[in-house]
Image: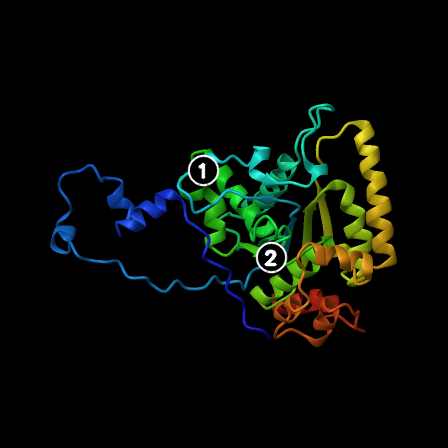
Amino acid sequence: MAAPATPSRTLPRSNFHNANAATNTPPSIASNADSTVASPAYQQNEHFKHPDHAIPPPDYTTYRNLVIVCCHAIFHPDASSPEFPLYSPHDEKNWHLADFQKSNPDTGKPGEQETFLAHTLAGIDAVIGESSPDVPNRTLLVMSGGATKLSLTALSEGRSYYHAALAHELARGNRGGGRTHQFFSEGRILLEEHATDSFQNLLFSIVLFRQTTGRYPKQIKVITHAFKARRFLDLHAPAIRWPSGRIQVQGIDPVMSGAEREQTIEGEEKHGITTWLQDPLGIDHVLAGKRINRGWDEQVAEQLVEGLEDSVKELVKGTVPGHLPWESTVVQDENMQ
C-alpha cells in the first residue's frame, strides 16, 4: 500500500497572517499591538524567534467519500499580494475565461465565473455538512484542474478555484480565510493540478484520494455543470468500471435563456457525448489533441500512479485492464469498519 501523500501547504496565507509572521508575533499579541506595555515574557525574550514546529500530518483513517469540483477556468489574482482580498471572484475581469464563457451585453448573458464560484462553494458546503464534533471526518474535497492556460499563467485551475474561495471568504470579513483555509490546512481540501478534461477530473481525483488516504473512495459526488451529468454517469464512470451506485452528479448550470440552453445541450451531444462515446479513454487524436493543447504531459502519468496497483497504472496510461481495485472496494471497506 502506498504511503499517504501529504497535501501541499505552500499556498499564500492571508495578509493578516503574513503581517504577524513578519514580526514573529503571535496573533494574540498582534491584536494588542497598540499597547505600550508588552508582557513580561516578551520583555525578557525580546530576541526570541518562534521556531518552525513540525505539524503532525492529517489522520485520514476515517475518510471514505470523495467530492470532486471540476474546474473550467482560472481565477488569476496573486494570492500572495496584500491587495488580494480586493479582487472579487464575482468580477469577470479577475478570471481567464474562454470566449464562450464570457458575458455578452447584447444578449444579457452573464459571465460564467459566477457558476464556477458556485461549484467551488458547493464543494465546500459538502465538507461543512460533515463538520460536527460528534461525527468523524469522512469526506475529502478535491478541486480538480491543471494549468490549462500556460500562455497566460502557470497557475492551475484547481489552485485558482481554492484562491477564488479564499477571496470570497476574505471579502466577507472572514479573517485568515475562514473555513476554506481551515479545511485546506486540515488536509480536507486537496488540489488535483493535472487534469485537462472531465475524464481526467474523475480518474485523477480518485487516484489522489487513494494516494492520500491509502484506499479508494466508497462514494463519489461530482460537482460540475448539470448538462454534463450524462457524460460522467453514462460514459466516464463506465469507462473506468466505477460502480454506478457509487457515483452522483450535482449539476449547477450557468444562467441561460431557452435558446442558449438548446445550443448548449446540442453542443454537448455533438462535441461531448459523441466524441467520448467513440473514444471512452480520450486517447485518440481529437481528445488527445485537446489535452496537449491544454498543457497535458504524458510523463506526468508516471508520477500520478507511483506505488499504485499495476491495473491502475495501465488505466491512467490509456488501457483498461481485466480488473480494477475499486470494483471490490465496498467489501474491503466493510472489513475495515
Q: Based on the displayed image, in which of its 4 quarters is residue 323 positioned?
A: bottom right
Q: Mark 2 or mark 1, which has the lower sequence index? A: 1
Crowd band around label 2 with a 10 angstrom C-alpha radius: few (<14), some (14–19), many (20+): many
Q: Residue at x 57, y 46 (%)?
A: 161
Q: Is residue 281 above or below residue 120?
A: below
Whole-percent x, y for residue 223 in the image: 67, 46
Towards the viewer: 245 or 78: 78
> Which residue is at a point 20% across and 36% down the rendered structure image?
34
Q: Position of residue 221 (x, y in %)?
A: 68, 50
The x, y position of residue 22, in whole percent, is 29, 50
What residue do we see at 51% from left, 37% from top? 168
Q: Residue 290: x percent and y percent?
A: 75, 55
Question: Observer-nearest residue: 3 or 80?
Answer: 80
> Helix or strand or loop: what does disc 1 sit on?
helix
Above or below 115: residue 54: below
Q: How is the image coloured?
A: rainbow
In-front residue for pair 299/307: 299
| Distance from the alpha carbon under mark 2 to that under mark 1 | 24 Å
- Residue under numbered circle 2: 192
Task: Judge from the rendering whether residue 168 lies leftward or rightward of residue 41; answer left or right.
Answer: right
**Disc 1 marks which residue?**
85
Q: In which quadrant of the rendered image does the N terminus lie?
A: bottom right
Residue 82 position by quadrant? top left
What amino acid type is highlighted by mark number 1?
Answer: Pro
State which quadrant residue 54 falls in: bottom left
In this rendering, position of residue 291 left or right of residue 33: right
Report the amino acid beneath label 2.
Glu
Pick whichever, 15 or 59, lies toward us. Answer: 15
Label 2 secondary element: strand
